[in-house]
Image (spheres, rainbow, N blue to C red):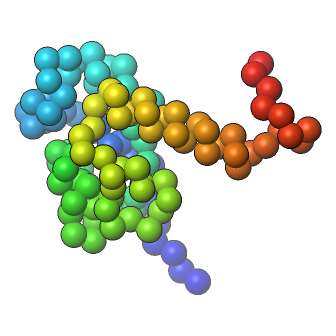
Amino acid sequence: MCRERRCCTYVMPQTLTDSWKQDLGNSYQYDHEVFLNKIGNLTLTGRNSELGNRPFKEKRDMLKEGFRYSPLYLNQSLARAEEWNQTTIAARACELAEKACEIWIHPDGRWRNH
């Protein structure tokens, strides 16, 4: 069975457009510097070239390519998000961390914080 190739991509892009700067507000430089490479800002998609640096709502809503239409569980929170900023990135990072702890349980059944 052949599967579509998926790659890791940024939700908030590496290069901010004027639209992204406006959506992020006055703190856009800080938000970009601090949150760009956080796990909450990364996802998998087979449509990286189509999504590119588009504004978040366009990335979310694009017919067939957008996060709303993604078959991946990983993208469900992106499909529900109304905006994309430091708050939503941090919340998604926590959600992903909790899910990872459910999936990858320590052999003795406890989470160890080392």
1 vs 114, left or right, is left
User: In which quadrant of the rendered image does the N terminus lie?
Assistant: bottom right
- Residue 18 percent location from the top left of the image: 8, 33
Q: Position of residue 100 (x, y in %)?
A: 64, 43
Q: Nearer the viewer, residue 61 or 53?
A: 61
Q: Quadrant of residue 114?
A: top right
Residue 7 appears in the picture as rendered: no
**113 lies above or below 75:** above
Answer above or below: position of 91 versus 42: above
In the image, taking residue 91 as reference, residue 114 lies left or right, namely right
Q: Position of residue 85 (x, y in %)?
A: 28, 31
Residue found 48% across the figure and 54% down from its top: 74
Q: Nearer the viewer, residue 46 or 75?
A: 75
Res 22 → quadrant: top left
- Residue 2 in the image: state x and y as whole percent: 54, 80
Question: In percent of the image, x 33 and y 52: which residue is there?
Answer: 80
Identify the residue at horizontal 38%, vertical 33% (top origin): 89
Residue located 17% across and 45% down the image: 55
Q: Is residue 27 left or right of residue 91?
A: left
Q: Quadrant of residue 40?
A: top left
Q: How many marks?
A: 0
Does residue 30 appear in the picture of this structure? yes
Tell me if 60 is positioned left or right of 113 in this view.
left
